[in-house]
Amino acid sequence: MQRHVFLNIEQLSQAFADFAATTLQNTLSQKQHATLVVPGGNTPRYYLPALAKCALPWDRIIVTLSDERWVDVNDAQSNEHLVKQHLMNHLPANTRFVGLKTRHDNPFAAIEEIHQRLDQLPLPLSLTVLGLGEDGHIASLFPGMNPDLSTTHHCVAVAPPVAPSPRVSLSLKLLAESENIVLVVTGKTKRRLLNQLNEYPDPELPIVWLLQRTHATITVFETEAQ
């Protein structure tokens, strides 16, 4: 991991946007299209608008999600809703977005359709942006899951024991094969977790699964502010 520490979320957001824009430009200098994966949650509300201000050839960038809650896409808890509000609505109208939600009653029934959507993307993923949970989860891959679950699909359905709704997540394999990975970490607890991983990479934590499987450098943008 390459870790970059900032005093506040505003500084982090600008540095992240500059890094992401450069990374995507580098990809587009070699390929016709790039794939950008973004997460949901609270923190992207700060850094996605900064990214939206970057002058990029957005018509050549396809945006998708790291995971999704199985709620209506207009629900306040929907990651698609958040990403459209804070990123897509500020980009040119021809910027392509690929959501993960389907008409199915639950994500377990939707895996094949979501896999087909993801399989149409330019792979490997060009830039994957992830958050980090205080329990070490990434996307919707949680401690206690089988890290090699559903390796034949690009996605996996999840029923977290403490979450209000089931979810769908990009698979560990698809995430790990990303060409570039960014981890955005806010708050003292999550930063302390990263510090502990240097001494003891707990094999139960999904962030450790990713570190052990990826060949990409994971660039971390972190601040103790929340």
Image (spheres, rainbow, N blue to C red):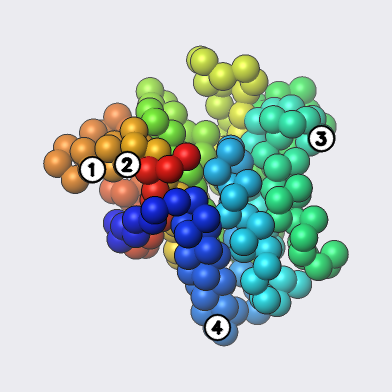
Q: Residue furthest front?
A: 7
Q: Which residue is mark 4?
A: 30
Question: Nearer the observer, disc 2 or disc 3?
Answer: 2
Q: CA distance from mark 2 to mark 1?
A: 6 Å
Looking at the image, tell me whether mark 4 or mark 1 is earlier in sequence order. 4
Q: Nearer the viewer, mark 4 or mark 1?
A: 1
**Residue 191 tag number:** 2
Q: In this view of the protein, which residue sits in the foreground, 25 or 16? A: 16
Residue topped by disc 1: 195
**Looking at the image, is mark 1 or mark 3 nearer the viewer?**
1
Q: Looking at the image, how many numbered discs can be counted on the residues?
A: 4
Residue shown at 51% from the left, 39% from the top: 139
The answer to whether 72 appears left or right of 18 in the picture is right
Q: Earlier in the sequence, mark 2 or mark 3?
A: 3
The relative height of residue 23 versus residue 80 in the rendered view (above or below) is below
Residue found at x 21% / y 38%: 196
Q: Which residue is mark 3?
A: 74
